[in-house]
Amino acid sequence: MPLYTVLLLAVALSMDAFAVAVASGCALRAPDPRHYVRLSACFGFFQFLMPVLGWYLGLSVREYMEAWDHWIAFALLAWVGGNMLRSALKSLKDRECSCPATDPAAGRNLWILGVATSLDALAVGLSFALLQTPIWGPAALIGVVCALITACGLYLGKSLARLCALNGWAELLGGLTLLAIACNILREHHVFD
């Protein structure tokens, strides 16, 4: 898989983390360096871990699915992208601006948010296994990109607290990017020929 595709995928997968980080910055008002490190490290770690877990899961069932692998990868990415689009459109329609009431960068909240924002990466890892694509490099890039985007989201959140509609637009962009990558998988397998 080309580097630019993995980079776009990493950015798309990071949009949930970005949206949560913006909301967290809104709640924290003045996040200190510990908040940046904890939130970025946690989100980056889970965005790295989930594709690896999905990849190993995919390896165990790959031989049974090779004839359908590109369709399965398309369906998984389209499902995740579609869910992101639906959530983004609802957020934009309702003009929601929900900020957490407790410190999102501490304790159980941090771990729950880390897992919740990275579940879509599990499906991506499964897709990589089905497409026989190595995982370690892409997973590391996904984790690093997510950590950086999380830090940016936290910083923006503290200064853009009144513009929470940005969360919906970021998630919308992430969903569209995942759908584009899903369609590109079918194009690469000459489904549209």
Image (spheres, grey):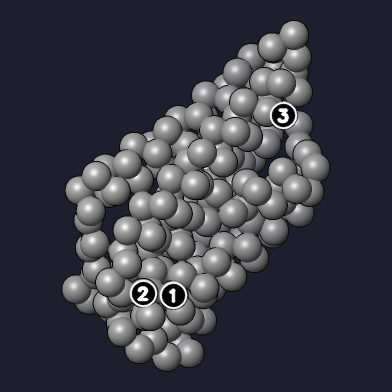
* Residue under the image location 75 percent in, 48 percent down: 4
* Residue under the image location 69 percent in, 12 percent down: 191
User: Looking at the image, which is closer to me, 189 or 22?
Assistant: 22
Mark 3 against mark 2, which lies toward the viewer? 2
Residue 78 in the image: above or below residue 13: above
Check disc 3 and give the amino acid type: Leu
Mark 2 lies on residue: 160
Q: What kind of element bears circle 1?
A: helix
| Pointer 3 with pointer 2, Cβ within 8 A | no
Q: What kind of element bears circle 3?
A: loop
Mark 3 lies on residue: 131
* Residue under the image location 27 percent in, 49 percent down: 91
Q: In which quarter of the image is residue 21?
A: bottom left
> Nearer the N terminus, badge 3 or badge 2?
3
Left or right for 96, reference 105: left
* Residue under the image location 64 percent in, 56 percent down: 142
Q: Residues within 10 Å of mark 3 (few under 14, many from 20)?
A: many
> Nearer the N terminus, badge 3 or badge 1?
3
Q: Where does the image place residue 131, in percent across and percent down from the top left? A: 72, 29
Residue 125 in the image: above or below residue 108: above
Residue 110 in view in this figure: no
Check disc 2 and give the amino acid type: Leu
Q: Where does the image place residue 184, in percent across and percent down from the top left? A: 68, 28
Mark 1 lies on residue: 156
Q: In which quarter of the image is residue 44?
A: bottom right
| Pointer 2 with pointer 1, Cβ within 8 A | yes
Residue 14 in view in this figure: yes
Left or right for 187, reference 177: right
Left or right for 111, reference 187: left
Check disc 1 and give the amino acid type: Leu
